[in-house]
Amino acid sequence: MNGRVRAGEPYHCPTMEKLSIDGAYLFRPRIHADERGQFLEWFRAAGFLGDLGHRFELHQANLSVSRRGTIRGVHFADVPPGQAKYLVCVSGTVLDVVVDIRLGSFTFGQVDAVELEGDRRHAVYLAEGLGHAFMALTDDATLVYLCSQPFAPEREHGINPLDPALGIAWPAEIPPLLSAKDAAAPTLAQAAEAGLLPDYQTCLAYQQSLR
């Protein structure tokens, strides 16, 4: 098998699978494997246009390598413009978490988690305004992120990933390892009281402007 499409054959791009939170998707690529290894397309702009109604504007690409137990997040950015993310685990395994922190959303406070494995190459997309976190379940767990906006410290915020109100089911057998910044981040309630959380209708209006 190979990654080619014969001349005259239509290319059917794998679709995004909606998660339980509006604006979050799981992408399952087609992996073409043989004795040489693997080939896959993990990003195709046309797929976003078809499934999301707008293209993904790439402005920054990140790569993180984490030891087992590392938790990064919950991170989010002011909307507009926010920062949509499309990420894939290329090595190891992570528990990837989406948190709906948009005030006024019918799933506000809800959490969805997907286990991403390097050999399966599944990817997760998060729209602007959603919170993101993950835990490395293996050493040297490696994530590659595509970001719709560059990192801007003045617009970036965090919520403590161990906030009991979020109820994220981090694996109990793995001791969590957090940065000092993430450990000192406010709870969801404190972030709401401080006016840090994005507004759901504002997020929808911004995403509509991208169409």
Image: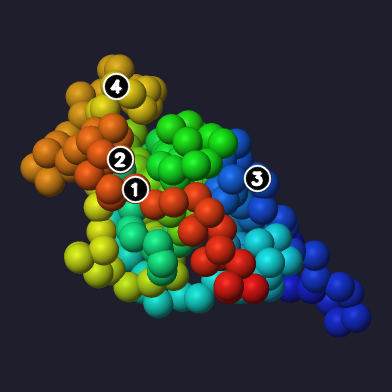
Q: CA distance from mark 1 to mark 2?
A: 6 Å
N-term mark: 4 or 3: 3
Provide the residue designation for mark 3.
18
Kindly indicate the quadrant of the structure image that contains residue 169.
top left
Q: Which quadrant is home to the C terminus?
A: bottom right
N-term mark: 1 or 4: 4
Q: In the image shown, does 173 or 99 lie closer to the viewer?
A: 99
Q: Secondary structure at mark 2?
A: helix
Q: In the image shown, does 197 or 156 lie closer to the viewer?
A: 197
Provide the residue designation for mark 1.
197
Q: In this view, which residue lies farthest toward the right?
A: 8
Q: Which quadrant is home to the N terminus?
A: bottom right
The residue at 67%/47% (across/down) is 17
Disc 4, disc 3: CB below 8 Å? Answer: no
The residue at 66%/62% (across/down) is 52
Say whether residue 210 is visible.
yes
| Vertical order, 147 against 176 (above or below) | below
| Vertical order, 81 against 191 (above or below) | below
Which amino acid type corresponds to the residue marked 3 in the rendered image?
Answer: Lys
Q: Disc 4 or disc 3, which is closer to the eye? A: 4
Q: Secondary structure at mark 4?
A: loop
Which amino acid type corresponds to the residue marked 1 in the rendered image?
Answer: Leu
- Badge 4: how crowded within 10 Å, few (<14), some, or many (20+)? few
Q: CA distance from mark 1 to mark 3?
A: 23 Å
Q: Disc 1 or disc 4, which is closer to the eye? A: 1
Q: CA distance from mark 4 to mark 2?
A: 15 Å
